[in-house]
Image (spheres, rainbow, N blue to C red):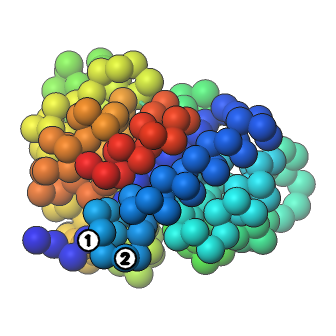
Amino acid sequence: MSMRRRLVIGNWKMNGNRAENQQLLSDLVNLQKVGGAGADDGTKGADVELAVCAPFPYLPQVADALKGTGITWGAQDASEHAKGAYTGEVSVAMLAEFGCSWALVGHSERRAYHGETSDVVARKAAAVIQGGLTPVVCVGETQAEREAGDTLKIIDEQLAPVLALGADAVKNMVLAYEPVWAIGTGLTASPEQAQEVHAHIRKLLAAAGAPEQRVLYGGSVKAANATSLFAKEDIDGALVGGASLVATDFQGIADA
Ligand code: PEP
């Protein structure tokens, strides 16, 4: 078995409000206390790391709720710039002030709706590392790209500028394979489809000098399909959208 510690990250996307978040966070913390992931008593799930990526304005609320619980938190994006005239953007230093451990970069919704290219994604990943946080770099093909047989080519193109940051940088990253056609659609890549891409990403990581970086799978992960996905050699955990909004669903994935 590899030494890669399992990691399950929730991506709340643009959901929640103060009251709903408070409930979700306290439910998560309570589930942890009864021996779920992150429990340090050697019971089930002790080798799983849990994190949530919340909308920017709620990061202080998340920090207050999760401080000292073993669950870490992060943002869903970060600016590539350190400071200045970038209206609407949030810097990595600002995220660090709110205790963030993680920033997602290159989520397919950012790529699709905000025109983020793979070069931008690589610069954001570099900024996140520079600021002392860990980027979760998301890649994945669309349905049309898969049907055209281009999946691995797309992964190569999306990762090229990221891996070109060099081994020292890549050793501070987590990658997430998220087929666009599986995000929020209820369609999940089969464990075999996912493993094929994860093995390819692992080869690229090895060539970049960082073979042991974690590679998460994302795309309609639920407790019911998590076990068979996590059984695959190169799948080290999950990036979870919809199911991260219900504490028992999210904990169910962590328990898997
Ligand atoms: C995501 O947005 O990262 C994601 C995987 O969403 P969902 O789990 O809802 O498919």
On the image, the x and y values in percent for residue 137 come to: 45, 54
On the image, the x and y values in percent for residue 124 come to: 59, 58
Cα–Cα gap, marks 2 and 1: 20 Å
The residue under the point 77% across, 54% down is 61
Where is mark 2, residue-wise?
Answer: 41
On the image, the x and y values in percent for residue 135 come to: 51, 62
Image vertical order of residue 73 relative to residue 25, above or below: below
Q: Give SS at disc 1.
A: loop
Question: Label 1: few (<14), some or many (≥20) within 10 Å?
Answer: some
2 or 1: tag closer to the N-terminus: 1
Question: Which disc is residue 4 wearing?
Answer: 1
The residue under the point 39% across, 19% down is 185
The amino acid type of the residue labelled 1 equals: Arg
The amino acid type of the residue labelled 2 equals: Asp
Q: Are marks 2 and 1 in contact (CB under 8 Å)?
A: no
Q: Give SS at disc 2.
A: loop
Q: Is residue 199 visible?
A: no
Determine whether, in the image, residue 148 is placed left or right of residue 248.
left
The residue under the point 35% across, 20% down is 186
The residue under the point 28% across, 63% down is 44
On the image, the x and y values in percent for residue 67 come to: 67, 69
Determine whether, in the image, residue 107 is placed left or right of residue 141.
right
Quarter assignment of residue 73: bottom right
Quarter assignment of residue 215: bottom left
Quarter assignment of residue 228: top left
Q: 114 or 245: which is nearer to us?
A: 245
Q: 104 or 144: which is nearer to us?
A: 104
Q: Is residue 3 visible?
A: yes
Q: 30 or 20: which is nearer to us?
A: 30
